[in-house]
């Protein structure tokens, strides 16, 4: 019988091999390969993740009654991470601990990771494939939390790792407490334009709005250097001001003299190891072909759009989103989120939070969708 260490190592190597091969060659897992590895990880988590095993038992699954395929793997609600430590190991020795931004009765959700190998490999492979398929070196100008001051922010960690690995110059962080350092950003963007250094502006949607407001107040417009791109991430959860993405992207394109096709949205969450991205940069889309925005995932991450009974809905049907992430080896392989969306052959369209979005079970065609 294998030890915990041996089982964990074998699963990590299997997932890392998938990540590395796709990163290098674009190779993807077949349905059979994904099924097999997802069920291996599920069975392992039943053995070592007590809170998850208890949840699975409440859903009628155990070592004696396994799911038939990855669609049947019980998905833990993301909110449950605020109530229990979903980990296959002692959380006290976690290499990475990421916290959710929201709280429930004073508690933040926490995602514990046994080591950084899977997280680092997954985030770099996804970013490279979807944000820099041209392998270009970029200067990273970040309107996201600084990893030095926010060590438990998964977004801060992600952009810190990307900047460290692929930065082509000085990396900047412009969020200082509750304010944006607009003067420093203007100085940096002017220097990049003068030296024709391509940049990647990474910003949460909320920070991007405030950046654009500040530039508007100063009557400032720029023409980004060739090869530059903008990564928008996150939404307006818990914020009083909301700007529709279609409007936000139009403002951004005008203010930075950029095509909408170089504005790419990243979609991730604390409870996942891997991320989705718009396909506009990877597919070298034109402005005329950026809507609707389809989210693509790396091959070890697959979405399910589900109805109230938790069963997978047909393509073109709106439902809540479940994500099966094989890189979540040391936590939970399947996560049920509070987001809703619809899946098409071309990819996933995320439509927002359950509270204010279209009812589940409503069928749409791609032509019906507008950017939200």
Image (cartoon, rainbow, N blue to C red):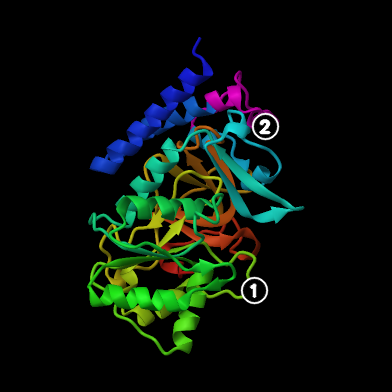
Q: Position of residue 89 (x, y in %)?
A: 58, 28
Q: Is residue 235 visible?
A: yes
Q: Is 290 within the magenta? A: no
Left-right relation of 64 to 128: right
Residue 51's image quarter?
A: top right
Q: Residue at x 30, y 61 (%)?
A: 169
In this rendering, position of residue 81 left or right of residue 252? right
- Nearer-N-terminus badge (1/2): 2
Q: Which region of the structure is painted magenta?
A: 43-69
Where residue 276 appears, as percent x and y from the top left, is: 42, 52
Q: Is residue 51 magenta?
A: yes
Q: Nearer the viewer, residue 43 or 148?
A: 148
Question: Where residue 240 is drawn, which disc sits there?
Answer: 1
- Give 253 or 317, whichever is nearer the viewer: 253
Measuring from the top left, give residue 256's x and y in whole percent. 35, 78
Any mark on residue 51, and which? 2
């Amino acid at each position: 019988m294998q030890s915990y260490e041996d089982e964990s190592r074998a699963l990590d190597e299997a997932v890392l091999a998938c990540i590395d091969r796709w990163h290098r060659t674009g190779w993807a897992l077949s349905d059979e390969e994904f099924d097999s590895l997802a069920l291996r990880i599920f069975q392992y988590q039943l053995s070592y993740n007590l809170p998850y095993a208890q949840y699975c038992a409440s859903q009628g699954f155990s070592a004696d009654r396994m799911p038939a395929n990855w669609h049947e793997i019980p998905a833990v609600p993301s909110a449950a991470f605020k109530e229990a430590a979903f980990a296959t190991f002692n959380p006290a020795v976690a290499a990475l601990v990421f916290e959710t931004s929201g709280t429930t009765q004073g508690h933040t959700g926490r995602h514990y990771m046994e080591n950084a190998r899977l997280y680092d490999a997954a985030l770099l492979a996804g970013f490279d494939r979807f944000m820099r398929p041209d392998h270009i070196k970029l200067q990273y100008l970040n309107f996201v939390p600084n990893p030095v001051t926010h060590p438990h922010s998964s977004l801060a960690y992600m952009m810190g790792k990307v900047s460290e690995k692929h930065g082509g110059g000085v990396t900047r962080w412009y969020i200082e407490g509750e304010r944006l350092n607009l003067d420093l950003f203007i100085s940096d963007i002017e220097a990049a334009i003068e030296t024709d250094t391509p940049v990647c502006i990474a910003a949460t949607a909320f920070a991007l709005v405030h950046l654009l407001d500040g530039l508007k107040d100063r009557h400032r417009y720029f023409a980004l250097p060739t090869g530059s791109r903008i990564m928008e991430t996150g939404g307006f959860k818990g914020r009083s001001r909301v700007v529709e993405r279609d409007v936000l992207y139009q403002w951004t394109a005008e203010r930075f003299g950029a095509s909408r096709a170089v504005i790419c949205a990243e979609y991730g969450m604390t409870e996942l190891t891997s991320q989705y991205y718009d396909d506009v940069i990877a597919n070298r889309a034109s402005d005329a072909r950026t809507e609707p925005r389809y989210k693509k995932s790396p091959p070890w991450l697959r979405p399910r759009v589900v109805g109230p009974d938790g069963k997978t809905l047909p393509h073109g049907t709106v439902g809540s989103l479940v994500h099966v992430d094989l890189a979540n080896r040391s936590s939970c392989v399947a996560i049920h989120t509070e987001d809703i969306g619809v899946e098409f052959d071309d990819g996933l369209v995320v439509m927002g939070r359950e509270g204010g979005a279209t009812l589940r079970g409503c069928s749409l065609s791609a032509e019906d969708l507008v950017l939200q």
